[in-house]
Structure formats: C-alpha cells, structure tokens
Image (cartoon, rainbow, N blue to C red):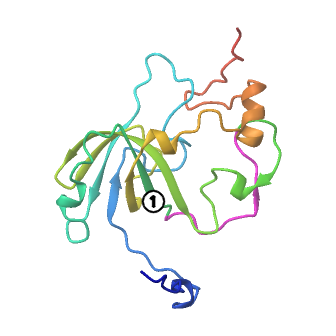
Amino acid sequence: MPKLPQKRYIQAVEFPREIAMQPIGVVHSPYTERHGTPRQSQLQAAPKDYQPATATIELFEDVVPAIALKDLEGFDYIWVIAWLHLNKHWNPTVTPPRGPKVKRGTLATRAPHRPNPIGLSAIRLLQVEGNILHLEGIDLLDQTPILDIKPYVSYCDAFAEADCGYVSEMERDRSHEDDVFGNHRPPITS
C-alpha cells in the first residue's frame, strides 16, 4: 500500500485567541469562604483524629448524563478541574504560605490566582450516586463551577521520585506551614 501524505490538521484551524467553556457541575462543600478552606485536598501530616471534610459534586444532567459516570466508581481518587470563579486578578509572583517568605513565579506555585483561574484537585471518591459524586477531602468552596472530572490513575499520575524544585528543598529542610489546626508542626525528628 502506498504511503499517504501526512495530513496537516494543525493548519486547518486558526490558533484560538479565546476559549469558551461551560460548567458541567457544581461543588456542594462545607467551605463558604476562603479563610479556613484547605489549600490542598490532602494534608501531608494530619493529626490522628483529623477527619477530612466531605462534599459532593453535582453534575448537571442536561450536560453530563449519568451514563458518562459509568465505571468511575472503583477509582479511589479523581482529578477535579474547577473554575476558581472568585479570583478576578492575578500577579506574576506570589509568596507561598510555607517556607521562607520569598516571592515565587505564580506558575511555579499552586496559588489560586492565575492567568486563567483553573483549579486542579486530586480528591478521594467515596461513591457515585446518579449524577452526584460523594467526596472526602476537598479544597474547593461551595458553589465552585466544575469544568471536568478525570480518573486518578497512579501509574501515570504519581511520580514519587520526582524533584519538586523549591518544594522538595523545603521538605528536605523539614519546613512546614502553619496548618489548618492553628499551630505550627514541629520539625520531624528521626
């Protein structure tokens, strides 16, 4: 069979200067204000009696029919991609809440104030019930619009040996932020 010429798909459409999306669902979370909402969906060193908050994501049936969730139950975690709708402005540098008070490039942080306020959270999936996802451990405010859900797949989503730049340095220095419990964790000793 003769080799066909390569198709030029990328030349068939202009580069988009604007992207429009619609929410596929909404978060129902106990967090109604930024202060007190966890900065990440999981804590690195939680107290023994810590119970992560539970929440739900309601997917809009007119956008995402329940059949789209088929086979999602059985995954321990899901990636939740959200529109951080309360964030209207951003700066190119921010001071992260832990470690030395040094300004870092925004794109080298998990700061919610970004050029496009998109949030990414790995959240424990407890149950799928129709178009409702029951979750544990959430870092999103109530009424946050959801853009997409993807399954967390450990073989390609977790890189335990990956270097995380200045974050890895803080871990080696055992530098921890004041946590949601209002006290500073002492350095871990061997």
Please rate how many residues cluster around mark 1, counting C-alpha atoms within 10 Å: few if below 14, some from 14 to 19, many from 20: many
Viewer-side residue, 5 vs 104: 5
The quadrant in which residue 164 appears is top right
Side of 97 where 17 appears, left or right: left
Q: Secondary structure at mark 1?
A: strand
Q: Residue at x 71, y 52 (%)?
A: 108
Q: Nearer the viewer, residue 5 or 87?
A: 5
Taking the image as drawn, is residue 164 in sight? yes
Residue at image position (56%, 43%) is 39
Residue closest to the far front: 1
- Up-down relation of residue 8 to residue 80 (above or below): below
Q: Is residue 29 above or below residue 45?
A: below
Q: Residue at x 81, y 50 (%)?
A: 103
Which residue has dot 1 on it? Answer: 82
Task: Residue 13: give x, y in percent of width and height.
Answer: 52, 90
**Of the pair 6 and 190, the residue shown nearer to us:** 6
Q: Amino acid at mark 1?
A: Ala
Image mark count: 1
Query: Can residue 88 be found in the magenta stretch?
Result: yes
* Magenta stretch prevailing secondary structure: loop
Position of residue 45 measured from the top left corner of the image (x, y, whole percent): 56, 23
Q: Is residue 82 left or right of residue 109?
A: left
Could you say where residue 152 lies in the image, as x and y percent from the top left? 42, 45
Q: Residue 61, how many percent across, how many down?
A: 20, 66
Asked if the stretch drawn in magenta spans residue 31, the answer is: no
**Quadrant holding the C terminus:** top right
Q: Is residue 37 visible?
A: no
The quadrant the N terminus occupies is bottom left
Query: Which stretch did the figure color magenta?
Result: 85-97
User: Looking at the rendering, which quadrant does residue 82 occupy?
Assistant: bottom left
